[in-house]
Image: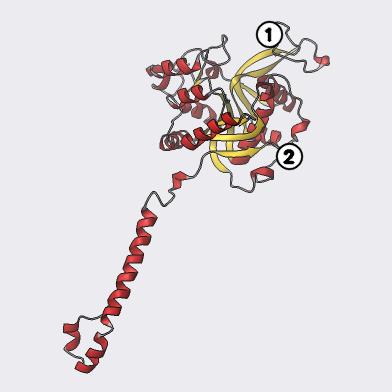
Amino acid sequence: MPTSPKLFSSYSHPRRFANLRRFIPLFCFLFGLVGFLFGSISFFSANPRTSKCAGSNPLSVSVSWDLNSQLPGDGALGARERHKVMGFVGIQTGFASARRRKALRSTWFPADHQGLHRLEESTGLTFRFVIGKTKDKSKMAALQREIEEYDDFILLDIEEEYSKLPFKTLAFFKAAYALYDSDFYVKADDDIYLRPDRLSLLIARERSHSQTYIGCMKKGPVFTDPKLKWYEPLSPLLGSEYFLHAYGPIYALSADVVASLVALRNNSFRMFSNEDVTIGAWMLAMNVNHENELSLCSSDCSSFSIAVWDIPKCSGLCQPEIKMLELHKREECHGGPTTSDR
């Protein structure tokens, strides 16, 4: 920094001072210019409109359905780092379920990024809506507007049709495995009332089996029931035997189980008409450990309920847009202890 003229003149030659004094305005100008540039850089770096904070990265992501084996970092997903979480929860939804998603975002699924991050940090779980695609341009445009507003989706490059739910489910597990390094991968429907804190405790339990299938288990007939039209033959050799599988609204697969699904080619799987039966058949073939958890199919909120839905009347809440909001008003549904009283 240049010395002041008064101090400088006390020991400098007058003529030398006169020559140097002509450079003082230039020094001041350069010093001011540097200060202006430094201040501008600091301002724009701190300005939230011109900078990205750590939590501003997009949450929604689009992934592709590939007929070949698709491991993390391969194929259409591209090379990307897998995020480490304790559990990943994919809320299966569709194009006719906008009101359901609105009800969820008004209850246990936070609508804003900060709230969602707080929930994920407190539970160790990550939550995203999972949806396929449609040829209806107006529906795709509406979905895009919802993504821009909430940014909480995983988009699968597979046709969103009820008849293709088993294919969507497999695509979901493959996509979730490629994106997240998780201890458990949870498939849940958008018409159940969930307690994320209790789900976190369930997943965090110590288990002796690395290949685990958690759900509210039921035994379904191997052959088609002409009245229910729910099941297809698993094998003619099995006769009228039954096999154990989880109810469809919510179940979880451990990382080792999902890794086995990911390692196989998509066209090597036998698909059944019902998604939960399909998964159950695969789990039977893989000889995984079945963990029956009745708290995942509670008909009402209680001290141990994790997922509430109108079992057996409906596969989910019968009127989810209304019932979801009604349940959330009750203290026993969203508050109270997170440990089981059983």
Front position in the image: 2 or 192:
2
Location of residue 96 by image quarter: top right
Residue to which mark 2 is pinned: 69
Residue occupying image coordinates x 55% and y 33%: 141
State the image coordinates of residue 218 (x, y, percent, origin top left): 64, 14
State the image coordinates of residue 255 (x, y, percent, origin top left): 63, 35
Task: Report helix, strand or loop for mark 2.
Answer: loop
Residue to which mark 1 is pinned: 228
Q: Quadrant of the N terminus?
A: bottom left
Image height check: is 37 above or below 22? above
- Farthest residue, direction top: 227
Give the mark, 2 or 1, whose residue is nearer the N terminus: 2
Q: Taking the image as drawn, is residue 210 in sight? A: no
- Farthest residue, direction right: 237
Location of residue 226 by image quarter: top right
Front position in the image: 13 or 283:
13
Residue occupying image coordinates x 57% and y 30%: 138
Front position in the image: 220 or 51:
51
Q: Residues within 10 Å of mark 2 (few under 14, many from 20)?
A: some
Position of 57 compared to 42: left or right?
A: right
State the image coordinates of residue 272 (x, y, percent, origin top left): 73, 21
What's the residue type where badge 2 is placed? Ser
Image height check: is 175 above or below 291? below
- Farthest residue, direction front: 138
What's the residue type where badge 1 is placed? Leu
Q: Taking the image as drawn, is residue 319 in sight? A: yes
Q: Residues within 10 Å of mark 1 (few under 14, many from 20)?
A: few
